[in-house]
Amino acid sequence: TIKGFAFDLDGVITDTARFHAQAWHKTADAVGTPWSETLANGLRGVSRMDSLELILRTGGHEQDYTQAQKEALAQQKNDNYQALIQQLTPADILPGILQFLDELQQAHYLLSIASASKNAPFILDKLGIADRFDGIVDPNTLHQGKPDPEIFIRAAEIIHLPPTQVIGIEDAIAGIAAINAAGEVSVGIGDPQVLSAANINFKDTQALTLKHIQQSVYF
Ligand code: B16
Ligand code: MG
């Protein structure tokens, strides 16, 4: 039986991808990599350092920067990003998510956060929903990013459940792969053609309800 839910943050609870894109666009300009929608999409769900590497590689600049310079670029991006997310309010919670959290809490499910973002605690606080989660995985302690299952295994551990009793919710292909590899039930938010590896699909957060999940074979 399912006893808990592990949530991705960006793309599931709130749309911070637009702020990541804005901040990375500046980085791309600074290193001379042409900005594109394809590049922006490739950065979804990817860790900070891996995102920078992708931007450098896309422009053919992977050999042009020392490790120290890369760290400075990543720091600069995060400073710009943090300036942008100051403006987040509870109105930035994606449609249907608050009602979904209410449903889950009323049914006494345990809830955790499996976000690659080191800014997740700050973002949840700005959204006014930090206290609704029983645990937040600290990405500083992880060895591998999504699609490695580590973050979702940890997201089950921190709510004291085996992965088989947890449903993971993700908007990224790498995230669904991570949930599946962790042995959890995967829920994909977004184009079902793109997230075809998910056990259950919803086209957007508005469509996500406990009832719809329960209608699947996993309960
Ligand atoms: P930070 P998620 C991910 O969040 C974002 O989708 C990704 O664009 C970002 O680079 C990553 O977090 C790290 O974020 O720089 O704030 O530590 O989808 O895993 O909730
Ligand atoms: Mg995401």
Image: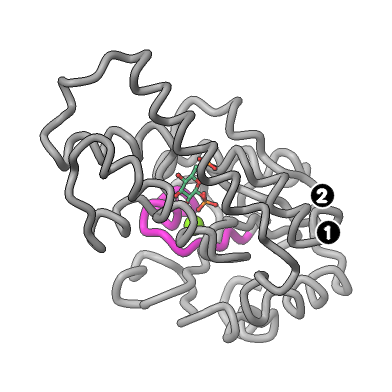
Q: Residue at x 27, y 43 (%)?
A: 28
Residue 61 drawn above or below residue 200 = above
- As drawn, is 31 to the left or to the right of 172? left
Residue 186 versus residue 136: which sits nearer the camera?
136
- As drawn, is 40 to the left or to the right of 13? left
Q: Position of residue 8 (x, y in %)?
A: 57, 56
Q: Position of residue 14 (x, y in %)?
A: 60, 65
The amino acid pointed to by label 2 is Asp
Rendered image: mark on residue 132: 1
Residue 46 drawn above or below residue 106 = above
Q: Position of residue 197 (x, y in %)?
A: 36, 64
Which quadrant of the figure contains the C terminus? bottom right
Magenta-colored span: 167-180
Q: Residue at x 48, y 41 (%)?
A: 149
SS for tag 1? Answer: helix
Residue 69 versus residue 206: which sits nearer the camera?
69
The amino acid pointed to by label 1 is Arg
Q: Position of residue 192 (x, y in %)?
A: 36, 77
Residue 183 versus residue 206: which sits nearer the camera?
206
Q: Are marks 1 and 2 in contact (CB under 8 Å)?
A: no
Quarter occupied by residue 96: bottom right
Residue 66 drawn above or below residue 73 = above
Q: Residue at x 28, y 33 (%)?
A: 53
Rendered image: mark on residue 134: 2
